[in-house]
Amino acid sequence: MAQQPKKSTTDGPSPRTLLLYAGLAVVAAALLFAAFGLESDTGPTLEEVAGDPTIEGEVLPVLPEGEDPAVGTTAPVVAGADFDGDPTTIGDAEAEMIVFLASWCPACQAELPELVEWMEGGGLPDGVELTAVSTGLDPNRPPWPPEGWLIDRGGYNGDVLVDDADGSVAAAYGLSGTPFWVVLQDGQVVARAAGQLGMDQVGSIAQSIAP
């Protein structure tokens, strides 16, 4: 009678055993992460990033299509801070341009490098202040946090005011979309615009209000 072939002694572990090993490895990794705090870094919370600005004065109406009823009216004065907590104020300068930016906004992402290049090239006239208001804060909409997008990677080195979690500064200035530009002279609204502007246009506006 023919002998049955002997089962090889070099056979690897069974699929069931491999699954068991894999499960144990996952559990062990989870325990290590929990023990040593190696969970993924999701960045700062909304509360840690959001500002706490104070707003004085009448809020501006939301920018409509067509003629802007806010032109010639007094803009609210906002006292807040930048990402480092240093004080920043908008609405009280002799000549001022304010741009509201949201880190997740595609048009803002396209405009930022053009704005940075324009400023670095000396486009902003003497006597004209330009402040970027970081608004639309949302940790669920990347890139987050906005400081990384605007300053660390974006290269913006001008004045910054951080809006609160409710977008109160944006609402006070009648924001209708981002980017949102507000031009002031002696606290009076000269112009507002929603959407991306070319730097030639921004430069012309800046020159028109320069003291």
Image: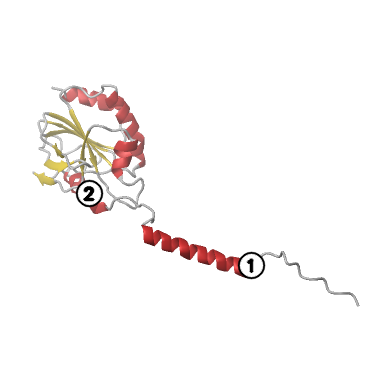
Disc 1 crowd, CA 10 A, few/some/many (<14, 14-19, 20+):
few
For the C terminus, the image quarter is top left
| Along the line of sight, the residue nearer the viewer: 184 or 127 | 127
Task: Identify which residue is drawn at 24% across, 51% down.
Answer: 48
Report which residue position mark 2 lands on: 50
Q: Is residue 90 above or below residue 165?
A: above
Report which residue position mark 1 lands on: 15
Q: What is the x, y in percent for residue 42?
A: 35, 52
- Report which quarter residue 208 is drawn in: top left
Q: Nearer the viewer, mark 2 or mark 1?
A: 1
Q: Is residue 188 above or below residue 3?
A: above
The kind of secondary structure element at disc 1 is: helix
Mark 2 and mark 1: span between their CA atoms?
52 Å
Q: Locate residue 12 relative to residue 141 in the image: left or right.
A: right
Task: Identify which residue is drawn at 33% across, 35% down.
Answer: 154
Q: Is residue 147 above or below residue 41?
A: above
| Along the line of sight, the residue nearer the viewer: 203 or 72 | 203
- Report which quarter residue 92 is drawn in: top left
Disc 2 crowd, CA 10 A, few/some/many (<14, 14-19, 20+):
many
The kind of secondary structure element at disc 2 is: loop
| Along the line of sight, the residue nearer the viewer: 206 or 135 | 135
Identify which amino acid the numbered label 2 is placed on: Ala
Q: What is the x, y in percent for residue 80?
A: 15, 43
Q: What is the x, y in percent for residue 134?
A: 25, 42
- Residue 76 is marked as none
- Report which quarter residue 115 is drawn in: top left
Identify which amino acid the numbered label 1 is placed on: Pro
